[in-house]
Image (cartoon, coloured by chain):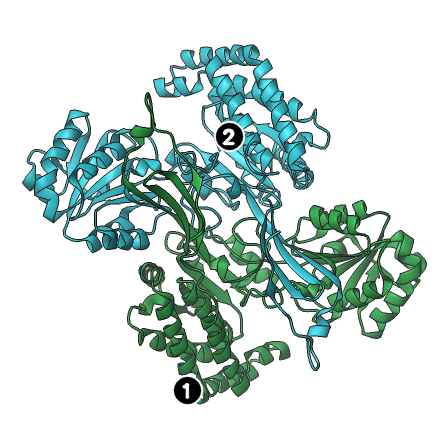
Chain colours: A green, B cyan
């Protein structure tokens, strides 16, 4: 599609978003239910389309993990259906009152949540991302422009067509609510639509997210790197320490919330490092370490500076000895990507210091870094994990897709009445929430 | 200063922000009190420095409004002192719990507000902006890099030196909390510090804010344009309509929340337009209008397309007749800058439709657009007004300078326990707020 066509798509999305913004939760849920039923009924056709994608993928010799993410089966399609229905069950994030204040008699202010507007969602090979993101956007009253992976072209097309036809069965839901673009040059054009697109949600590799962040003026919700730390304090329970360090590294090493660097307080290093290294070697984790670690456990490769700033997303780990909690905090704030960092200690004051002074979106005491996730946090659904310092941070649920507006209801007031001599005074009485 | 020096300033600010983030409200308030006392005690020296700025300004023939914003007197300095003390009285925005959830027995999640980090505040001639912005940043635990107007150089320098020396009297408050840069080329360098500066707050002309927005990857909190509408509905009380329309235009025409376009429903146009035009002409407002208005009140200049997209910030107004509420809503959503729009009507359903369907940060029923302001909204203090669709919208108070982090407190849990066969199940019990 040409730049002009992408502009039209963005305008259509914006027009749709204005209608979506004030749909009742009932209508939105009916549209979601139609989406779910449509995918359920068309499972066979979805799998057929997916086979065509898989054939191309095989010819092109794509990597095994990519192939497995691309491949759909009946279970995965039923997972999509179930996922959409779980979004039906979530509370409407729109129309919630965040603040109420009586400014004066007959002059009342309320801060009410509303959708952001138009979301651009860009993601890689998994076709299951389409119903997931579409349902979250619809529930939060946002229009969405989807860009899926090229590998999943056929699967994506049929899924988007099914859900678009489905939502239009419900009166009031505009067809422009869900649109799809397909090529990289279309993405480039989409990233320029800052007047009509309000938020970009990219999912994919670090480089991919970094490219998006560096090539648009539209706010981006996401994270590129996930360099997470576990710090084993001098007062750590050593059994907990070993269990948590292992889980943080190996439970799913490709995840962004997996540990990349382990810090160990010098007073427990001698006691714990041999067991830890044995455990890590047993499960096939490659280790690099500082000189102090190598003195205690010989034979580990020396870490170079780059190691402390690398997200391995693999069975590899850097280990460093530190001489104090403060050194650990300083090191983490310098090297962490602000994603998730954990302290293992039995000493509450040390834990508190760590939780207060580490500048990351999730700070954890005596639990695995792998807990930092929308489902585990009980957010109901996850749009993504954000390491931004504005808008939304950490695992982001539906409430990351809304903002608010102020509604002021008066009875004819002018500002002149509140100015100059004999000015009326504001009351500013906080009101109970509706 | 060189690019490298600006980078050093940004790094110093970041280091300071990490310390500021966990200062107690008591320490922050003591530092604010020191700031206030220091300005109070040095009033004479501040006025002396200001005279030097005024002398240069006179030689350079700056405009009268700029000169008056630049000029300090004892009252204005006491206003700064009072302003800082009012920030002492505000609740600490940091450390508030936004959400609590028991994920499982002994595994508790809390979402807690924390500072954003480093704020870059760029503003024009008024030296009073320095203590105001500095006190709001300090109270919210953010480090700030200030860039004031060139005209106010001498005044800004002495004020910044006074408040920096003052806050350092309180143990724990880092000197890098408040820094100043002075030239435009330094601003250009600052806008590139996206790794160390988390939010830019620009205050000034539309062009100035637009320049900032287009030249940085750092999130910008602000608005460039304020094209605000008043819509007089078919069921409007005509006395309220005239009073509110006048107030919205003339109470302070240079403000961003002043009305630029007045829409009138055709069924009341004949009845109301003559009186309205008479009133506007009486107070010297220049009018342009659509053909329908000109048929009812001859002699008004025809509005051209550009008029509907122009913020006059002056005694000038565009008037248009519309044939329905829906037309008014559509017109406003197409031409408004998303700042503030008001409906005048006695019909609740029409008002509700307007408040729900207008996509602006403040939507108002039967009151002047001029109410859209942090002080009038009772926010205690205003950082600025934002027309962004993410993070903070409308008049932004102290809570626009914080974000949150997740604190997860466990007792040794690993994610493996919650996966696979015999997986533990999460409880996800919402907790009462602390």
Front residue of A20/A335: it is: A20
Residue B111 lies, with reference to residue B51, above or below; the image says below
Number of callouts in the render?
A: 2
Left or right relative to A3: residue A136: right
Residue B62 lies, with reference to residue B107, above or below; the image says above
Left or right relative to A166: residue A332: right
Front residue of A417/A60: it is: A417
> Are tags 2 and 1 found on a single chain?
no
Regarding residue B183, the answer to whether it shows in the image is no
Q: Mark number for residue B347?
A: none
Q: Specify the subunit that label 2 lies on.
A: B
Residue B124 is situated, as x and y percent measured from the top left of the image, at: 45, 27
In space, the residues marked 2 and 1 are separated at their CA atoms by 62 Å
Residue B421 is situated, as x and y percent measured from the top left of the image, at: 70, 82
Q: Secondary structure at mark 2?
A: helix
Label 1 crowd (10 A; few <14 / some 14-19 / many >=20):
few
Regarding residue A108, the answer to whether it shows in the image is yes
State the image quarter where residue A253 is shown.
bottom right
Q: Mark number for residue B184?
A: 2
Residue A247 is situated, as x and y percent measured from the top left of the image, at: 75, 68
**Marks 2 and 1: which is nearer the front?**
1
Residue at mark 1: A41
Q: Secondary structure at mark 1?
A: helix
Q: Pointer 2 and pointer 1: residues touching (CB < 8 Å)?
A: no
Front residue of B235/A398: it is: B235
Q: Specify the subunit that label 1 lies on.
A: A
The residue lying at 27 percent from left, 47 percent from top is B335
Residue B98 lies, with reference to residue B383, above or below; the image says below
């Amino acid at each position: 599609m040409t730049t002009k066509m992408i502009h039209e798509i963005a305008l259509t999305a914006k027009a749709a978003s204005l209608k979506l913004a004030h749909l009742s939760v009932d209508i939105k849920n009916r549209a979601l239910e139609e989406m779910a039923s449509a995918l359920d009924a068309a499972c066979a056709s979805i799998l057929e389309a997916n086979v065509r994608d898989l054939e191309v993928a095989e010819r092109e010799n794509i990597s095994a993990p990519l192939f497995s993410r691309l491949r759909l089966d009946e279970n995965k399609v039923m997972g999509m259906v179930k996922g959409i229905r779980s979004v039906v069950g979530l509370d409407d994030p729109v129309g919630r009152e965040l603040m109420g204040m009586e400014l004066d008699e007959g002059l009342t202010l309320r801060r009410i949540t509303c959708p952001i507007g138009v979301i651009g969602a860009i993601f890689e090979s998994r076709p299951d991302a389409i119903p997931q993101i579409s349902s979250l956007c619809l529930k939060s009253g946002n229009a969405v422009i989807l860009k899926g992976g090229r590998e999943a072209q056929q699967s994506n097309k049929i899924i988007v067509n099914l859900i678009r036809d489905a939502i239009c069965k419900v009166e009031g839901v505009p067809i422009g609510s869900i649109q799809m673009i397909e090529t990289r040059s279309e993405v480039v054009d989409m990233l320029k639509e800052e007047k009509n697109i309000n938020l970009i949600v990219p999912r994919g590799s670090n480089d991919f997210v970094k490219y998006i962040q560096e090539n648009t003026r539209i706010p981006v919700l996401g994270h590129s790197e996930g360099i997470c730390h576990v710090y084993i304090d001098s007062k750590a329970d050593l059994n907990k320490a070993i269990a948590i360090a292992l889980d943080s590294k190996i439970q799913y090493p490709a995840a962004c919330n997996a540990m990349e660097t382990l810090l160990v307080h010098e007073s427990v290093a001698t006691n714990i490092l041999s067991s830890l290294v044995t455990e890590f070697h047993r499960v096939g984790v490659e280790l690099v370490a500082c000189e102090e670690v190598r003195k205690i456990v010989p034979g580990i490769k020396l870490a170079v500076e780059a190691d402390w700033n690398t997200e391995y997303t693999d069975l590899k780990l850097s280990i460093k000895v530190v001489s104090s909690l403060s050194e650990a905090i300083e090191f983490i704030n310098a090297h962490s990507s602000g994603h998730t960092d954990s302290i293992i200690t039995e000493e509450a004051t040390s834990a508190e210091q760590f939780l207060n002074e580490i500048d990351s979106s999730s700070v954890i005491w005596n639990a695995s870094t792998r807990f930092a996730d929308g489902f585990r946090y009980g957010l109901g659904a996850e749009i993504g994990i954000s390491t931004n310092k504005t808008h939304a941070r950490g695992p982001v649920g539906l409430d990351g897709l809304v903002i608010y507006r102020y509604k002021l209801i008066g009875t004819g007031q002018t500002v002149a009445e509140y100015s100059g001599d004999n000015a009326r005074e504001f009351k500013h009485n906080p009101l109970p929430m509706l």
